[in-house]
Image: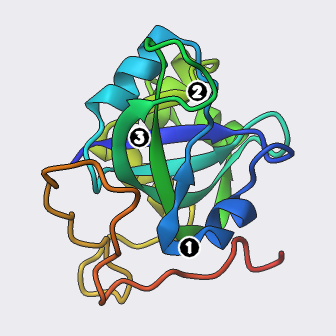
């Protein structure tokens, strides 16, 4: 499964709003008008995970989301060139990871968040994923309680956010201090 980073301005769409959508999920940020971001969305598969990043205000990774509907026509335009995906919240980070932390960590110097800061949908490597999760207080140790949900099978149609596997729980609504 591929990993991604989704940027969202918290005054327009916040982590708490994403969590409130529950298993249904929500169209991610209709209105993307960048070909590279569009192509990244077209490459996504159901079950791919991404970091939910608050841009402009906060500038921090605050949670983990999952792609729950494949790339489809962006409903905010009739122009067939523009797509969007649906995502749902999976888990908040225990501690938000700020842009400053990412820039200061030499292991993340090639991360798209540092090198392509304006791109709203970015790929994340497995190594970057592990480092950011570690900085955010999440363990990737399979013996720990938190586990990434098993990927859902590819549907023969594009459903709007299929149900989550019964063993996966939706965690709190964000940072513990909120």
User: Which of the marked residues, 2 or 1, is nearer the chain's N terminus?
Assistant: 1
Q: Which element type, helix, strand or loop, lies under badge 1?
A: helix
Q: Is residue 52 left or right of residue 108?
A: right
User: Which of the marked residues, 1 or 3, is nearer the chain's N terminus?
Assistant: 3
How dense is the environment of label 3, judged by Cα within 10 Å: few (below 14), some, or many (20 and up)? many
Locate residue 36, reporting x and y percent: 43, 13
Query: In the figure, 58 relative to 64: above or below?
Result: above
Locate residue 169, reporting x and y percent: 44, 85
Residue highlighted by disc 2? 120
Locate residue 11, reporting x and y percent: 86, 45
| Front residue of 71 and 45 | 71
Q: Quadrant of residue 130?
A: bottom left
Q: Please state which of the two labelled residues, at mark 2 or mark 1, is closer to the viewer.
A: 1
Q: Is residue 43 left or right of residue 27?
A: left
Question: Which residue does the image show at 33% across and 66% down from the upper left?
Answer: 162
Q: How far is disc 3 from disc 2 in space, using C-alphas?
A: 10 Å
Q: Which element type, helix, strand or loop, lies under badge 3?
A: strand
Q: Which element type, helix, strand or loop, lies under badge 2?
A: loop
Q: Which mark is residue 22?
A: 1
How dense is the environment of label 1, judged by Cα within 10 Å: few (below 14), some, or many (20 and up)? some
Question: Which residue does the image show at 68% across and 40% down from the upper left?
Answer: 8
Query: In the figure, 16 relative to 78: above or below?
Result: below
Q: How far is disc 2 from disc 1 in space, using C-alphas?
A: 23 Å
Res. 94 visible in picture: no
Q: Is residue 152 left or right of residue 59?
A: left
Q: Which mark is residue 4?
A: 3
């Amino acid at each position: 499964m591929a990993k991604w980073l989704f940027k969202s301005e918290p005054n327009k769409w916040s982590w708490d709003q994403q969590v409130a959508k529950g298993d249904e999920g929500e169209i991610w940020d209709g209105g993307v008008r960048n070909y590279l971001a569009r192509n990244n969305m077209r490459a996504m598969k159901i079950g791919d995970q991404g970091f939910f990043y608050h841009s402009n205000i906060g500038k921090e990774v605050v949670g983990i989301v999952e792609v729950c509907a494949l790339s489809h026509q962006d409903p905010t335009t009739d122009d067939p060139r523009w797509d969007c995906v649906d995502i749902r919240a999976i888990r908040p980070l225990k501690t938000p990871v700020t842009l400053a932390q990412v820039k200061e960590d030499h292991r993340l110097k090639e991360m798209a968040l540092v090198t392509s800061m304006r791109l709203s949908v970015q790929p994340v490597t497995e190594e970057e994923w592990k480092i950011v999760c570690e900085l955010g207080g999440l363990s990737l140790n399979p013996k720990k309680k938190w586990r990434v949900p098993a990927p859902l099978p590819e549907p023969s149609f594009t459903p709007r956010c299929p149900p989550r596997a019964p063993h996966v729980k939706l965690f709190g609504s964000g940072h513990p201090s909120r």
